[in-house]
Amino acid sequence: MRKSRWIGVGLTVSALVISGCSAGPAGTNVAQDTKAPLELWTRTTPGGAGEQATKRLAEAFEKATGFKVQVTAIFDDFETKLAQRAAQRDLPDIVMNDVTQVGTLKSQGLVREVDQGKIKHASELTEQALKSNQTPDGKLYGLPYSAQASALLIRKDWREKLGKSVPQSWAELADLAKAFTTGDPDGNGKNDTAGLNATLSTKRGYASWYFSNFLWAGGGDFITEAGGGKYKPSMSTPESVAAVQYFRDLGCKDNAIQPGSVTMPTPATNETFEAGKAGMYVVGPYLLPRFDKSLGKDKYEVVPMPKGAKNADVLAEGLSIFMMAGSPNQAGQDAFGDFAISAEGQKIGMEGESAFIVQLPVNKNVDITQVRSDPRWKTYAEIYAKSGHYAPSIPNWTPVRQDTADTVSALIADCKLDTKAELSKLDTKLTATLQQQGISAS
């Protein structure tokens, strides 16, 4: 283990509370050494394609700048292991993780603010990606290096066999889901297919993550900004209730959601789709290489989600570079972030058929069609630009996502529950969460 670099760490049950040893911003009073190697953690499967791509980017960075980088891939219990390192007062220098961690990491004092004056390529970032890394005070605590949005994957062979069109509305989506469920689209003579593949496990808030693609399109929201950085819960509004009811009817009324969905995290849901047990899946572009191999590129199509009651908004996500507090090599941190978001770094991150870490580029000067000829990637890029909807950067998004996931999953699991009543209970929980974070409008 490296020498402890900073002090003032307290670890509580609910969160890490970290303060520097002086009144300055987190991590700004540590003795600097530009020759110190950078320890980089990335949330991906060890030995997998993501780790390979991260190492490729790190090697290119080292060659271009001379800074040394040590890459560590961690997937299981990533946040727990990061907390352990924080308790040991020895954080990695750089963390590459979901953009939704911005608020949490900032409120815990684990990251330092990004000095855009030292990131020369920051001006090349798309406004959409840049804003996703800002906290409500307008400050930047992460650098986006990859973006993505959800699209609708449809078993094209099934759809054509049943004589159905690509759905353009929620009504048509429900109709196609029912047809895939009851019409024996795989032709095996058995009632063993589902219309919609859904990740509705409560683990890591998966149900909330998946359902957001329907909630926002229906005009609903988890929480709504009320001005001045304050929020109010919104899951029991008429728009949110209607969106939940529509989605719930797919499972409870039409039986069109795959069996066992409420216990399935993404790995199991992915397997269900590629095993030919479900006909539609709302998901990001990262699974294209996998499904091309397991299903066959000709078996399914990628299309925008149909418009809901309000619009066609879908979940936009991203991966960010976090410059962790206490680093003895802040110049190296800045240089790595700058390289990763540059046109060169973005193109390196997009290389390969499967071993890539940049889904959609965040640099305005990178045209995805010039890097990937597959038109499906352009479809995803257009969806992101037009309909991508990020979760808000509140101090801690995790409890909002988790409480919502618990309720959505329960409503699908138990069809006897009253939708409005359960969502009203959820809003009570969300109010308490917002109050705890000091951002409640009430």
Image (cartoon, rainbow, N blue to C red):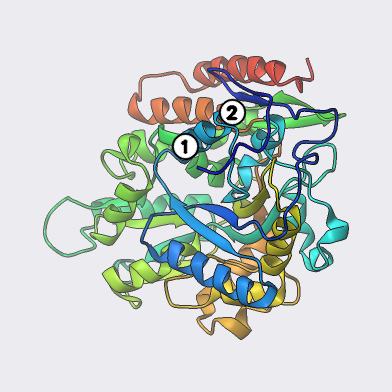
Q: Which residue is nearer to you in this view: 236 or 254?
A: 236
Q: Quadrant of residue 121?
A: bottom right
Cα distance between the residues tagged 1 and 2: 22 Å
Specify few, some or many for label 2: CA neighbours under 10 Å numbering under 14, 14-19, or 20 or more.
many
- Name the spot of residue 196 as percent of width and height, x first: 36, 50
- Name the spot of residue 396 as percent of width and height, x first: 64, 30
Which of discs 1 and 2 lies nearer the camera? The answer is: 1
Image point 85% across, 37% down: which residue?
137
The three-letter amino acid code for the residue at tag 1 is Lys
Could you say which disc has been placed on residue 81 in the image? 1
Tell me, yes or no, if residue 11 can be seen here.
yes
The answer to whether 183 is drawn above or below residue 1 in the figure is below
The three-letter amino acid code for the residue at tag 2 is Val
Image point 47% across, 25% down: which residue?
407
Q: Quadrant of the C terminus?
A: top right
Return the residue at label 2. 400
Q: Secondary structure at mark 2?
A: helix
